[in-house]
Image (cartoon, rainbow, N blue to C red):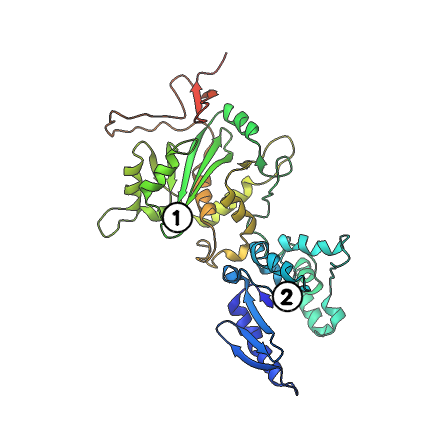
Amino acid sequence: MFTGPFRNQLKQSVWEEWNNWLERQPTKLKIGENATDLTIRLVDGKVLGLIGLDKYEHHRGIHPLAIVNDEVSRAKKVAFNEVLGPASLSHKGPELDITTPGGHNWWESRWAEGMGPDPETACWKIRSEDVGMVSKADLLAERRRLTAEMYAQEWEGEFTGTAGGPEFPAYIEKVWPGGHLIPPGLVREEQRRGGYLLGCLDWAYAGTAVLLWLWVTKSGGVIVVDELAVSHLTPAQMMTQAKARPLGIPPRIVLDYECWSPESDGKSVADSFRRAAPRTMFKKSDKRFPDSINRIREMMTMDGETDIPKFCIEVGKAPVLRAELLNLQEEDEKLTGGGFKDTVQCDATDALRYGIMEARGGISPIVIDSRPKGPLWDVRPNRTATGDEILSFDPLTGRPKWGGASA
């Protein structure tokens, strides 16, 4: 089996070359091919297969005898975790990664396993000038054209971080102070210092809709304290599930900007959410993409061991968001900078982007609501007339109880 980051790339650069080479051999090796599946049947009963890892979900359950992974540093880590890892264990056959480094991304640690104690795993760095396929004159021209870091990466196999890499390179899936996960006790301490609860929602019916609960600290930091990811639910059904969560429906939700466009009946998805949660204030999200990505990256910066980062996730919460932050890569962005590509799993990250652009330090602003209040109206604001200190937490719902500051 031969894999690459993208199926179309394999079909254009490898498929024809494979077939032509096999057909030129003096002894017949090939008996058939399937251009749709990108497979070639050999006379000994084996099959050569090309697999694009952008479509890795289609290849679960495969059992290859051997694997070659081309330009693997550009591929998604989740493809290895969920498909290639289990597949390679089925026969324990040889596996070879061939790639130019793609910056300090997930594959660097995979390559470094070759320097460990396992005698059956090895790694190499091979410089182009040691191979001889590219002339010294061409390499000299490239050295003049590229920066020193880019040349070291492209032609000498060094990890420099000049291209590719994860979308959020600063995110660390470890408990603080080693990473961005913080235990519940520390979350409660931050809540006692003040702040407010903010919801952010990326909507989809056929796909995945994600609602994140963010605790916005007085200093403007953000802690993700819960997550709801659903599919094929109406706004009313989603709000019903949100209401049953420990923190209930957030008093304010920043809603996907695409939900505010009127549909054929003149109403919008935002109207449906308003009807489903009349006690919640819904606000249209800020759709600026590069600004929100840069904002998240800035908040992920680890300043030291004394202060938690501006961005944190409570331990055990938000599994979808955590997986996306680890797996999203720079190449998943559209070239125009207008968002992530349509084939990319980014629903929770988009919800986070909306919340990050809305989050501000201090206490929740006072909102004047002139809508008539029904007999079951039960407002749970983040602030009372007596102050914005958290005195305790409800033992059943986990909601903070607010009151005046102690003298």
Within 10 Å of disc 2 (Cα), the crowding (few <14, some 14-19, many 20+) is: some
Of residues 265 and 229, the one drawn nearer to the viewer in this rendering: 229
On the image, numbered disc 2 is attached to which residue?
A: 67
Relative to residue 111, is residue 363 depicted above or below?
Answer: above
Within 10 Å of disc 1 (Cα), the crowding (few <14, some 14-19, many 20+) is: some
Identify the residue shown where x is 61% and y is 31%.
Answer: 307
Identify the residue shown where x is 59% and y is 73%.
Answer: 48
Q: Is residue 160 visible?
A: no
The residue type indicated by label 2 comes to: Ile
On screen, residue 334 versus residue 116, left or right, reads: left
**Place of residue 339 in the rendered image (x, y in percent of width and height, measured from the top left):** 45, 53
**Place of residue 180 in the rendered image (x, y in percent of width and height, measured from the top left):** 58, 38
On screen, residue 76 versus residue 388, left or right, reads: right
* Mark 1 and mark 2 residues within 8 Å of each other at the beta carbon: no
Of residues 54 and 198, the one drawn nearer to the viewer in this rendering: 54
Outermost left residue: 265
**Place of residue 173 in the rendered image (x, y in percent of width and height, measured from the top left):** 60, 42
Identify the residue shown where x is 71% and y is 54%.
Answer: 112
Identify the residue shown where x is 53% and y is 29%.
Answer: 187
On the image, numbered disc 1 is attached to which residue?
A: 231
Secondary structure of residue under mark 1: loop
